[in-house]
Image (cartoon, grey):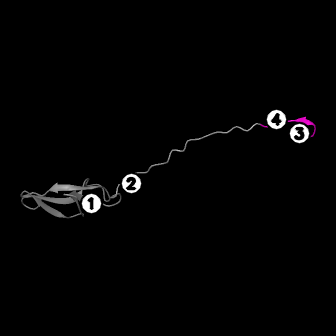
């Protein structure tokens, strides 16, 4: 290439970049507060009886209002 009496050599360099796709894993129940039992989803306050044991779906932590749920054993006197 000639520019105003100067000779400039232009060399192109080819760069290959391997694209790694971004993978985002989003569990189906993100945002859903549920307890699971035998593949079924139960909401807050649900009660199931398993071999004469009463379980209630409730907050995992008492100080959270939107945290995960878990099964809690209900005492025989209902508390």
Residue 23, how many percent across, how many down? 45, 49
Q: Please report whichever mark, 2 or 4, sits nearer to the chain's N-terminal start.
A: 4
Calculate the distance from the C-alpha at mark 3 to the C-alpha at mark 1. 72 Å
Of the two numbered discs 1 and 2 in the rendering, the one whose residue sits closer to the viewer: 2
Calculate the distance from the C-alpha at mark 2 to the C-alpha at mark 4. 52 Å
Residue located at (73% from left, 38% from top): 12
Instruction: Indicate the secondary structure of the residue bearing disc 3.
Output: strand
Query: Is residue 50 at least partly visible in the picture?
Result: yes
Majority SS type along the magenta span: loop
Q: Which residue is mark 4?
A: 9
Please rate how many residues cluster around mark 2, counting C-alpha atoms within 10 Å: few if below 14, some from 14 to 19, many from 20: few
Please rate how many residues cluster around mark 1, counting C-alpha atoms within 10 Å: few if below 14, some from 14 to 19, many from 20: many
Residue 9, how many percent across, how many down? 82, 35
Q: Which residue is mark 3?
A: 2
Residue 4 inside the magenta-drawn segment = yes
Q: Which residue is mark 2?
A: 26
Residue 18, how many percent across, how many down? 55, 41
Instruction: Indicate the secondary structure of the residue bearing disc 2.
Output: loop
Closest to the observer: 40 or 11?
11
- Image marks 3 and 2: residues in contact by CB distance under 8 Å: no
Q: Please report whichever mark, 1 or 2, sits nearer to the chain's N-terminal start.
A: 2
Numbered label attached to residue 34: 1
């Amino acid at each position: 290439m000639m520019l105003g009496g100067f000779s400039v050599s232009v060399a192109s360099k080819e760069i290959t970049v391997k694209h790694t796709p971004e993978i985002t894993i989003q569990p189906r129940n993100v945002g859903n507060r549920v307890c699971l039992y035998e593949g079924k989803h139960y909401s807050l306050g649900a009660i199931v009886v398993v071999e004469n044991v009463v379980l209630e779906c409730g907050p995992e932590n008492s100080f959270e209002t939107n945290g995960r749920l878990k099964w809690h054993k209900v005492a025989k006197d209902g508390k």
